[in-house]
Amino acid sequence: MTVIRLDNVAIVVEDLDAAIAFFTDLGLEFEDRAQIEGEFADRTVGLDGVRSEIAMLRTPDGHGRLELTTYAHPEASFSEPRTPPPNTLGLHRLMFAVDDIDATVARLRAHGAEVLDAIAQYEDSYRLCYLRGPNGIIVALAEQIGREAPPAAAPSA
């Protein structure tokens, strides 16, 4: 038996509305929002008394989905440090292919996003950057330039 697909990536955020605004301004499409609680939630995530709210977003091509989650109970905790460096073990970053990296960064700065260093160019293929989004999430952006290459060919750090 093999995996059928990657269904979604979930990220716990402090302010669900702000995270939705950030990721929809990035270009994801809002799907739905729901309250999650009950025994099935407790058993699924391994916590007691779960009360959370989720928002589902999808990439414009319909293949990628992002679940944003905020917890009313039990209260979410922060990792230390609150803005871990890119080489921290665990979820490293989310990368999105964009058509105009400069315009995308400008839109996301209005939501408090900060580029970790600079927009850099990889050979004649890509312009790339890492930026911090809601709750310190590292979001990578890649704009293909020059020769044709499949989206998955973007270099990764």
Image (cartoon, helix red, strand yellow):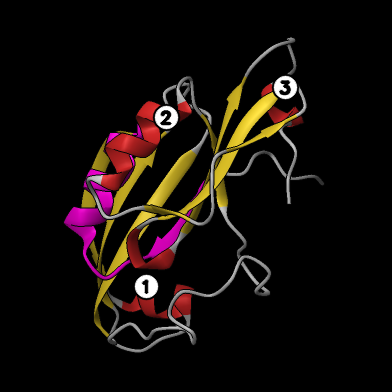
In x, y percent, where is residue 95? 57, 43
Q: Which residue is mark 2?
A: 102
| Mark 1 crowdedness (10 Å alpha carbons): few <14, some 14-19, many ≥20 | some
In x, y percent, where is residue 2? 79, 44
Q: CA distance from mark 2 to mark 3?
A: 16 Å
Task: Tell me if residue 115 comes above or below residue 72 in the rendering.
Answer: above
Indicate which disc residue 121 carries: none
- Asked if the magenta segment contains residue 22, the reply would be yes
Task: Return the residue nearer the eye: 31 or 37.
Answer: 31
Q: Is label 2 or label 1 in front?
A: 2
Residue at the far top: name it: 147
Q: Which residue is mark 1?
A: 41
Q: CA distance from mark 2 to mark 1?
A: 40 Å
**Magenta span of residues:** 8-28
- Asked if the magenta segment contains residue 1, the reply would be no
Identity of the residue drawn at 69% across and 12% down:
146
Q: Amino acid at mark 3?
A: Ser
Secondary structure category for the residue under label 3: loop
Q: Which residue is mark 3?
A: 125
Secondary structure category for the residue under label 1: helix
Q: Amino acid at mark 1?
A: Ala
